[in-house]
Image (cartoon, rainbow, N blue to C red):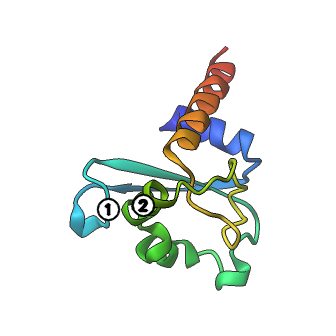
Amino acid sequence: MQRVSRTIERVYKASSLNIAIQDGEDAGQSVPHVHVHIIPRKHADLDHRGGLDAIYQMMDGEEGDIGAHMEEVNKSKTRTMFPAPDADDQRKPRTEEEMKEEAKWLAEEIQKDES
């Protein structure tokens, strides 16, 4: 998580991160495996949503329901390419192929940080 966090901050030009681990349904886990959210943040990025702590409402709400987003993607195959993390008002779910492409790209970026 630390290695990935360093890379996420660099490639998304973030000044900080929110890190959330969801392990179990009562912790908000929406897909059937433990996962970590590493969310790049920038100064005043959520002022328009009520401030810094708006991220928690977003994660608990419909926007944070990754399972529902994946169902929608599988039905519609909506295409967008690596949206900026602070452009959530225009962000659409990505296809599984796009997520694989992004994972490959980020793995290459992590390798750069380790070199």
From the top left corner, tell me how far across and down residue 92 is, in percent: 61, 63
Amino acid on which disc 1 is placed: Ser
Q: Secondary structure at mark 2?
A: helix
Q: Earlier in the sequence, mark 1 or mark 2?
A: 1
From the top left corner, tell me how far across and down residue 29 is, in percent: 30, 61
From the top left corner, tell me how far across and down residue 89 is, in percent: 69, 73
Above or below for 53 versus 74:
below
The residue depicted at 76 percent of the width and 65 percent of the height is 43
Q: Nearer the viewer, residue 58 or 79?
A: 79
Task: Name the image quarter holding the C terminus.
Answer: top right
* Pointers 1 and 2 in contact (C-beta within 8 Å): yes
Give the labeled residue for mark 1: 30
Which of the 4 image quadrants contains residue 55? bottom right
Q: Badge 2, how many Cα within 10 Å: few under 14, some, many 20+?
A: some
Amino acid on which disc 2 is placed: Ile
The residue depicted at 51 percent of the width and 60 percent of the height is 76
Q: Nearer the viewer, residue 88 or 100?
A: 100
From the top left corner, tell me how far across and down residue 110 is, in percent: 61, 26
The residue depicted at 73 percent of the width and 53 percent of the height is 15
Residue 36 left/right relative to 111 = left
Q: Secondary structure at mark 1?
A: loop
Above or below for 9 versus 113:
below
The tally of labels here is 2
Give the labeled residue for mark 2: 66
The residue depicted at 71 percent of the width and 69 percent of the height is 90
Which of the 4 image quadrants contains residue 70? bottom left
Above or below for 38 versus 5:
below
Q: CA distance from mark 1 to mark 2?
A: 6 Å
Q: Farthest residue to the front: give it.
A: 76
Q: Badge 1, how many Cα within 10 Å: few under 14, some, many 20+?
A: some
